[in-house]
Amino acid sequence: MFGILNKNKEPRDMDILIRDIMKDMDANRSVDDIIRRSGADEKFVRRVLQIYVTHPGVDVYGIMERL
């Protein structure tokens, strides 16, 4: 499983993390900026973004199912 930690290195709820990543993508932030802001593992963030971009209309739980 991917490392899902917040900036304080504490576990984060996956649905909240994915929602925040999606919001940052919608705000046209760069991938590097999203990785830095989320504090999550780079591979996890890139996978979430890949699913979000390639599956129009997918929601948080749809992304969680595909991980």
Image (cartoon, rainbow, N blue to C red):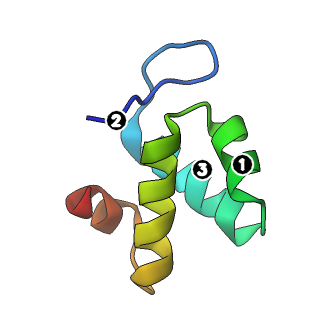
Q: Earlier in the sequence, mark 3 or mark 2?
A: 2
Which residue is outermost to the left? 65
The disc placed on residue 61 is: none
In what element is the residue under mark 1? Answer: helix
Q: Earlier in the sequence, mark 3 or mark 1?
A: 3
Query: What amino acid type is highlighted by mark number 3?
Result: Asp
Instruction: Measuring from the top left, give residue 8's x and y in whole percent.
Output: 61, 12
Query: What amino acid type is highlighted by mark number 2?
Result: Phe
Left or right of 16 in this view: 25: right
Which residue does the image show at 61% across and 30% down from the upper left? 39
The image shows residue 44, relative to residue 12, as above or below, that is below
The disc placed on residue 20 is: 3
Q: Which residue is mark 2?
A: 2
Instruction: Measuring from the top left, give residue 28's x and y in whole percent.
Output: 78, 69
Left or right of 38 in this view: 56: left
Which residue does the image show at 39% across and 40% down from the upper left? 14
Dot 2 and dot 1 residues touching (CB under 8 Å):
no
* Residue closer to the observer: 22 or 67: 67
Query: What amino acid type is highlighted by mark number 1?
Result: Asp
